[in-house]
Each structure stands twice: as C-alpha cells, then as structure tokens.
Amino acid sequence: MRARLVEVARREPFLVVAAVAALASCVLRPPDAGYREYVDVRTLTCLFCVLAVVRALEHTHFFSVLAERIIGVLRTRRSLVLGLVTVTLVTSMLITNDMALLTLLPLAAIALRATGNDDLLAFVFVMETVAANLGGMLTPFGSPQNLYLYHFYALDPRDFVRIMALPFAVSALLVTAVCLGVRRTPHDPVRFEDRVPRWPTALHLLLFVASLGIALRLLPVAAGVVVVAVLLVVDRAALARVDYGLMATLALFFVVAGNLARLPSVGDVMAELLDRDPLVVSALASQVLSNVPTAILAAPFTGEHAQLLVGVNVGGVGTVVASLASLITLRQYAALRPGDSGTFLRLFTLVNVAFLAALLLTTRGAVAAGWL
C-alpha cells in the first residue's frame, strides 16, 4: 500500500498536493451547503471534452502527421528546432499546453534522433515547454487557468485576445530569437509512415469544434453530453485516456479556493496583495503554487481581470512547478535520459527565469502605459 501511495505521489504530485490542501481547508471550513457553489461545471466540462477529443484525434495520428509534414521539409538544425518549437506554440493554442507537449515531445525526440541532432534534446524540450506555456495564453482553451478565468469573468473572446495579444507577441518573438541562435547545419530530411484515416478524423474534428463552441459559450454546457455520447460509440479508448488526474486536481483546487475565500483573514490578505499589483503578485505566486491554483485562488479577490490573466500566464514560465506542463516535460526527459535530470533542470531554470524576467518587465510596462 505504501509503495502504491509513493508511486501515485511521484506520478501525480499536483493531485496529492491538491488533495492535502483540500482536506486542510475542509478542517478550516467544514462542509456545508456553500460547497455546491465551488465547482465551475462549465470549465470542467470544456476541459474534459477538449482532452477527450484530443485523445481521439491522437488515435488517428492527426496532430502527429500534421507536425510530421512540417518537420519533414526542414533541412537544417536551425529550421528543425524552429519548426518543432513553433508547431508546439501553435498547437498549444488549440489543445491546451499539456496536451500539446504530450503529443509533440515524443515526436521531437524521434525527429532529433533521426537527423543526428540528439545533442539538442534538452534545449528543444525546454524551448517546447516555454512555447507551450506561453503559446496557450492566446486562446481561452489554451490552458486550464485561461478556461477558468474566461468563464469566471464572463469575458468576450475578442476582449480576451486583445488582453493577451501583447504578451503573446513578445513571447513569440523571444522564442523565435532564442531558436535562431542554433547553427544552420544541414541534415537529411525526416520521413514518417503514419497516415490519417479520413472519416474518423473528420468526425473527431467536428467534435473538437463543438468542444471549442462550449468553451466560447456558443453552445450550452449540455452539448458536452453529446460529445461524450459520440465518443462512447466511436472511440471509448479516448475517454479512458483522459487525464483524470488533471480533472481531479482542478476540482480539488476549486474546493481549496472556495474554502479560503470564505475565511475573512485569508480574504483580507489576498485582497490587499492583489490590490497592490495583481500582475506581479499572481506571476510570482505561480512560481510556488503553480498558475492554475493561483488563478482559482486570486480571481474572487480582484476585479483586475486583465492583469490577473496576464500574470498567471506569464507566471507559467520560471520554476519547474509554475505549470503542470513543465512537470510533464521533466518526466518525459527523465524517461529518455535517466540520470541527466540535473543538467536539464539547470538549463530549464536558466531559460525560464530569463523569459519570466523579460515578460514581467514588458507587461509591467504595458500596465504603466495603460495598455492593460
């Protein structure tokens, strides 16, 4: 039993932390009728549908083949790195940052090995993680914290994109500039064998559009039942492979946030801190708490939705615990290079802290200029 608990803690550290925090908060605020208001059903429904449909699309190799077609024409080390990282950045806007990494990190490892560029594995994994965490900021469904804040503040899609346009543009430019530092050494093209079946893929893409419609409030939450029902018929395995750990973690953090929000002392402290500088406070809090729980905890205590939204997204870079996606990368790298995690973490921290500093300076300047 003990060994099993240790394995769960190793595989799902955020879930364990969320469970302990939820239990502790329940001691401070015993269960009552108010608990029914904690969980954001639309956010969880949207996230579940997106994760399930992405898993179904993985079975058809849709994202892999799309990325393979792009990577297959890249003939130099520089273009390969830039292509891998750019594909990750764009994909994270559509299928959440953690799903983008789960899909594309293995592909990157194969492409680098096939072209004799295996020495770039750590650098590419770090840059793909930065791209996933920052690329996902541009859309409401690019990350769990975006989904939550988008629904919590009832934002308009155009307003959301307007808020995130500047930090996204700066992020994309920085990511591109770093990748251009790789030498332009030629290599053999990459060839892959996967093919995409037409009709299953078309059906899954239709379900994907429906999932985005729920996220954007164009369809009712009840439409999620239709998405799940179709998948039960055509691809039950996709439902089995949904990241239920992420779903449970998010639900538990709703409980933590709901309980803490009802404690006057905690509410006063949170409100005071966020009143001083919601952008910087949320970005720095994300370095310790991670950006999803930071968003859930902070939202009830500030009306500065733009600064909070930017803060938790920018705060996704920095420490390895700042985003769940970063822990996914660490696990994937450790599996490929056992015993080399220390070297990877040093490079990861150096690059991420530099990005965090640059983005905080830029976005803080935008706030001072009245752009946010």
Image (cartoon, rainbow, N blue to C red):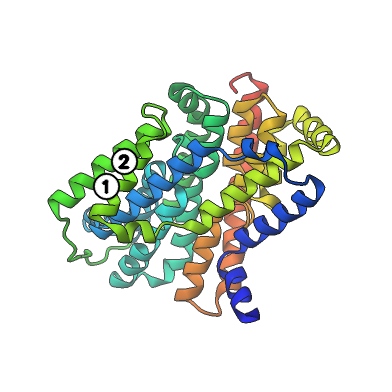
Question: Which residue position is annotated with label 1?
Answer: 230
Quadrant housing residue 74: bottom left
Q: At label 1, which amino acid type do we have? A: Val
Q: At label 2, which amino acid type do we have? A: Val
Neighbours of disc 1 within 10 Å: few (<14), some (14-19), many (20+): some
* Residue 16 appears anywhere in the view: yes
What number is the disc on residue 344? none
Residue at 63% in and 75% down: 6
Residue at 43% in and 67% down: 121
CB contact under 8 Å: marks 1 and 2 = yes
- The secondary element bearing badge 2 is classed as helix
Residue at 34% in and 67% down: 112
Q: At which x and y percent is residue 352?
A: 59, 53
Q: Quick check: 226 above or below 11?
A: above
Toward the left, the furthest residue is 198
Q: At which x and y percent is residue 219?
A: 36, 29
- The secondary element bearing badge 1 is classed as helix
